[in-house]
Amino acid sequence: IITCAAQQTVVIGLAADSGCGKSTFMRRLTSVFGGAAEPPKGGNPDSNTLISDMTTVICLDDYHSLDRTGRKEKGVTALDPRANDFDLMYEQVKALKSSIAVEKPIYNHVTGLLDAPELIQPPKILVIEGLHPMFDERVRDLLDFSIYLDISNEVKFAWKIQVCFFIYFIFVHWLILQNEFRFFLALGLSILFSLFQVSVVEMDGQFDRLDELIYVESHLSNLSTKFYGEVTQQMLKHADFPGSNNGTGLFQTIVGLKIRDLYEQLIANKATAPAEAAKA
Ligand code: ADP
C-alpha cells in the first residue's frame, strides 16, 4: 500500500483541567477549520467525541481504566495516572495517526461507567483533549504539537457561576516536526529552546459591541487570517459562545487561526519531505 505522507493524520494534544474551557475552545477551533463539530451520527448519545469534515476531537476521559465506582474503591481521582489506560491510548492514537480506524471506549459522564466502544475513523486532524495528553512519553511522541490551557481557580469558579470577570492565560507551545526536533536535540539545549515557541498572552476587559471588534482587528497584525475581518467574522458567528464578549473568546479564535496556520505548514512540509528524499 502506498500512503501519501501529506495525508497522515496530524495529532494535536490539548491539555487542561476540567472546567478550563476545552470544549468551548474546541468548538471555536473546529469552526476555524470550517464546519461545525458534532457527535457521531446515530451513535451513543453520551459519546464525548466531536467530528467535523477536517477534525475529530477525542476526549481522553474515554481512556479511564477505572469507572467512578472503581476510582472510589481505590481512593484515586480521574487525574491519577493509575485511573487511566495509557497503553490503549497510545495504541489507538498511533493507529489513527497511521490511518487505521479504532474501536474507542466511551466513558459515560452521566453514569460514570464505561460504555460499549464506538468506531473512530482516522481524520485529517485528530485532537486529543483532556487531563493527560502529554503524560505518557509514547503518546507525547505522537503529538505534532500541543496546547496547554492554564486557568486560575478563581477564573474557573467565576466561569462556573457565570461572573463576567476574568484573567485568562494561554500557553501555546509546539514542536514543529518530530524529525526536526530530534536533529536539534543533538545540537544542545540552547538550540532546542529555539524550537519551542512559548507565548504568554494576557488580556482583560469587555466588548460592548461585538461588531466593533473589526476596529480592534484592524490594529492587530500577524493574526494568520486568510482575509481581513476573519477574526471578527468568527466571533460574530459564535456570539453565543461563552467568552465572546471578552478577550478569552478573542484569544481562542486567534489561537485557532494560528493552529490552522501551523497545520498548513505541517502538511506542506510532509508533502515536500518525500520529494526531497527522492531527490537525495
Ligand atoms: P471543559 O471542557 O474544560 O470542562 P467547558 O468549555 O465545558 O470546559 O467550560 C466550563 C464552564 O466554563 C462552562 O460552564 C462554560 O460555559 C464556562 N466557560 C468556558 N469558557 C468561558 C469563557 N471564556 N468565559 C466565560 N465562561 C466560560
Image: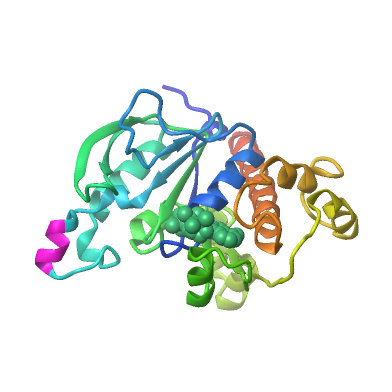
Residue at x 37% of width, y 61% of height: 132
Q: Nearer the viewer, residue 235 or 31?
A: 235
The percent coordinates of residue 12 (x first, y second) are 50, 50
Q: Is residue 128 above or below residue 200?
A: above
The percent coordinates of residue 149 (x first, y second) are 53, 64
Task: Classify residue 169 by image quadrant.
Answer: bottom right
Residue at x 39% of width, y 37% of height: 96
Left or right: 201, with 153 as reference point: right
Q: Nearer the viewer, residue 200 or 159?
A: 159
Left or right: 156, with 273 as reference point: left
Q: Main secondary structure of the magenta part?
A: helix
Left or right: 226, with 122 as reference point: right
Residue at x 58% of width, y 67% of height: 163
Q: Nearer the viewer, residue 215 or 150?
A: 215
Task: Classify residue 104 by image quadrant.
Answer: top left
Magenta span has 71?
A: yes
Segment colored magenta: 69-74
